[in-house]
Image (cartoon, grey):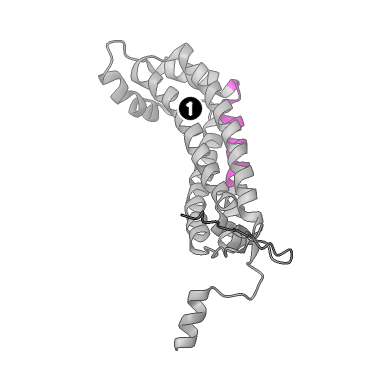
Amino acid sequence: MGEKKFDFSIIMDDDEASVPSDVWGEIPIKPDRRGPKTIAVLIFMGALLILFQAYTDYTTHGLEDIPDSEVERLLETPNSQSDTPITPEEYQQFHDDARDSGGYLIRSVGLFVSGTLVLFGSVNLFRLLSSGPKVATLGAGIGFVSGLYGSHLIRVASDDNLSGALLLTYEIFTYLCGTCMFLCGAFSALPLINARAKAALDNVNNDVQEPDLVADEESE
């Protein structure tokens, strides 16, 4: 039998590349305008809570002594669960040490600045302005640092004067403050990371409509 020969030839075209280098760049990204607005509403409510806590800390810092009725209310539940009850004098001493350390004032000022920036950033994010998430993230970062430091100073004062469940409460509050501010910062930065949300922020001043909206208008 004769040998069969097969000839293979590859035709290369210099004008047309076999695999375009920008094939992934041609995939359209549909802007997501609903997601950033939802996040804006969430961090807006978070900003109100931050400002409320800032006001509470500022009010507490201005008190020379906590009213006796308030002290009794605060100590009623912890003392019922402990074998060594905390006296009103010990709690007043804790308040004095925490105020003198500047913990309330530091946390109040830091959270006020943080809440204001987050509030301003949430409004801009709802308007789909790219400055919104940047400002809100900056505010959350300020609140994270000042909140942790101020809470740490208050916790140190509680270690010297309190015990039992009330001592644990102030320790948990330190971690809770840091966690809440971290989550606020993560939500604020999300529109800067997500491609669809970022596309909505970048195209906010353009007159380009989403394909679904255009199709609905044509069908009408």
**Which residue reaches farthest right?**
14
Q: Is residue 117 magenta?
A: no
The image quarter containing residue 90 is top left
The foreground one among 187 and 197 is: 197
Vertical placement of 64 versus 6: above or below?
above
Q: Which residue shows up at 48% across the image and 11% down it?
A: 160
Q: Main secondary structure of the magenta part?
A: helix
Give the residues drawn in magenta, as a range. 100-115
Vertical placement of 151 versus 26: above or below?
above
Percent of width and height locating residue 205: 66, 70
Q: Which residue shows up at 26% across the image and 19% down it?
A: 81
Q: Amino acid at mark 1?
A: Thr
Percent of width and height locating residue 11: 66, 63
The foreground one among 187 and 100 is: 187
Q: Which residue is mark 1?
A: 174
Q: Is residue 56 left or right of residue 203?
A: left
